[in-house]
């Protein structure tokens, strides 16, 4: 039996690109490629481990477009005879209501979980039990009476213990193979961020993971095998410069006759991101006409970051560089950002301790020349972190 393991498509409008729909189309193209490959490989079961969408709170016209894209993908697999199991992801990305709408469509062969649960597939002699633990965040626990007035460390310990207890309840004790599908941070995973942030994350421990034969996770965009039996699929399409060096794709887990898994990672043809870092010498070379080719930027989303003197900054024409990048085939020039050395750097008097975090962040970003869309994204991340801490 072959089991496809996919997650973190993050369908959404408004990603930085030539127009609000361009990156949405990239995601749809990548996910269509994934569906074709799943069908070609003859996978009987597809696990979608959460975060189908980019944002949880969107207007109805945008929500309709995003739900329609995910629904079409599910119908494509269903029509090919695949049994598809879906869980909702992180609440800030996935609105449970969107999944409930899709559930009401009663798509054949598609089962959706927005709360803990499970199902058994296969025959009595070859049972495949799939336990589902959808995404969650700290704020969901904070509203419960038993979590009130706890210190951060006690809160984290109790939250982690709850996840272990829930896994113990979900695991199937009959004969056959046990799979856990969830959307959580695993304590042995390469997360890509500082461990201190894990205090704000619901954690799946290795002790909980060992209750199962296979653990298929979403949430972290770095595809990996973490520990003996835990896998992150990663995202099929890159979404930002944090994914620049990440291989996008999904897993196919083949259940052998010995009830073990042989897992293969399938890389997808996703949009590339390319960062160009320049110093004074690079700027000088550009001004002298010695840099005129950008072969690496073709079809990529590009940003240029450069450090130079204030005098050199005055001679540097960003618009000419931007045109050259587009002439070389860049899909989109995200930014050309300077961090030049001022002769008399002065602190912005508008940024004071009396400002709230969101306002101070916005003013600092404006001072750094960061674009409005990126400022909004940083403010949204800040709000999510502040909510988790509170």
Image: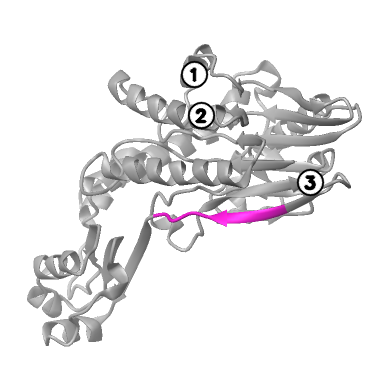
Extent of the magenta region: 263-270
Query: Residues under labels 1 and 3: Cα distance?
Result: 32 Å
Residue at the image point whose x is 82% and y is 39% from the top = 212
The label nearer to you, 3 versus 2, is 2
Q: Going 51% across and 47% down the picture, which residue do you hit?
A: 235
Q: Which residue is disc 3 drawn over? A: 206
Secondary structure found at label 3? helix
- Residue 55 belongs to magenta span: no
Q: Residues within 10 Å of mark 1 (few under 14, many from 20)?
A: some
Q: CA distance from mark 1 to mark 2?
A: 10 Å
Badge number at residue 19: none
Q: Which secondary structure, mark 2?
A: helix
- First in sequence, mark 1 or 2: give its number: 2
Query: Which residue is labeled 1 in the image?
Result: 102
Position of residue 43 in the picture relative to residue 93 (left or right)? right
Q: How many marks?
A: 3
Do the residues bearing badges 3 and 2 touch, measured as CB atoms within 8 Å? Answer: no
Q: On the image, which quarter does residue 82 sit in? A: top right
Res. 348 in view: no
Q: Is residue 36 above or below residue 178?
A: below
Which residue position is annotated with label 2? 74
In the rendered image, residue 175, in percent from the top left (x then y), is placed at 91, 30
Query: Mark 2 and mark 1 in contact (Cβ < 8 Å)?
Result: yes
Question: Mark 1 against mark 2, which lies toward the viewer?
Answer: 2
Residue 138 % position (x, y): 59, 31
- Residue situated in front as seen by the camera: 312 or 328: 328
The answer to which of marks 1 and 3 sits earlier in the sequence is 1
């Amino acid at each position: 039996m072959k089991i496809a393991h996919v997650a973190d498509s993050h369908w959404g409008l408004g990603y930085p690109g030539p127009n609000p729909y361009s990156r949405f189309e990239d995601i749809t193209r990548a996910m269509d490629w994934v569906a074709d490959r799943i069908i070609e490989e003859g996978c009987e079961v597809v696990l979608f481990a959460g975060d189908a969408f980019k944002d949880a709170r969107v207007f109805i016209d945008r929500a309709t477009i995003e739900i329609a894209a995910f629904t079409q993908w599910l119908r494509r697999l269903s029509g090919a005879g695949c049994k598809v199991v879906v869980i909702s992801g992180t609440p800030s990305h996935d609105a449970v209501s969107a999944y409930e709408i899709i559930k009401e469509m009663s798509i054949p062969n598609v089962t959706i979980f927005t709360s803990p649960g499970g199902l058994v597939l296969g025959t009595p002699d070859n049972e495949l039990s799939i336990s589902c633990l959808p995404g969650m965040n700290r704020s969901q626990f904070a509203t419960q009476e038993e979590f009130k007035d706890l210190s951060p460390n006690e809160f984290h310990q109790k939250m982690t213990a709850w996840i272990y207890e829930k896994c113990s309840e979900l695991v199937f004790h009959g004969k056959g193979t046990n799979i856990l599908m969830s959307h959580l941070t695993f304590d042995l995973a390469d997360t890509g961020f500082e461990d201190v942030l894990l205090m704000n994350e619901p954690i799946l421990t290795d002790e909980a993971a060992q209750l199962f034969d296979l653990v298929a996770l979403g949430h972290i965009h770095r595809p990996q095998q973490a520990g003996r039996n835990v896998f992150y699929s990663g995202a099929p399409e890159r979404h930002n410069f944090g994914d620049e060096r990440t291989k996008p794709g999904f897993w196919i887990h083949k259940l052998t006759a010995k009830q073990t898994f042989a897992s293969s990672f399938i890389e997808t043809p996703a949009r590339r991101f390319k960062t160009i870092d320049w110093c004074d010498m690079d700027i000088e070379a550009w001004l002298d006409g010695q840099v005129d080719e950008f072969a690496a930027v073709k079809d990529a989303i590009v940003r240029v970051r450069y450090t130079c003197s204030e005098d050199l900054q005055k001679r540097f024409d960003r618009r000419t560089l931007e045109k050259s990048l587009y002439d070389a085939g860049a899909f989109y020039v995200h930014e050309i950002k300077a961090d030049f050395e001022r002769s008399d750097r002065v602190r912005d008097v508008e940024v004071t301790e009396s400002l709230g975090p969101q306002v101070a962040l916005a003013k600092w970003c404006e001072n750094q020349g960061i674009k409005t869309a990126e400022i909004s994204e940083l403010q949204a991340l800040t709000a999510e972190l502040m909510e988790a801490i509170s």
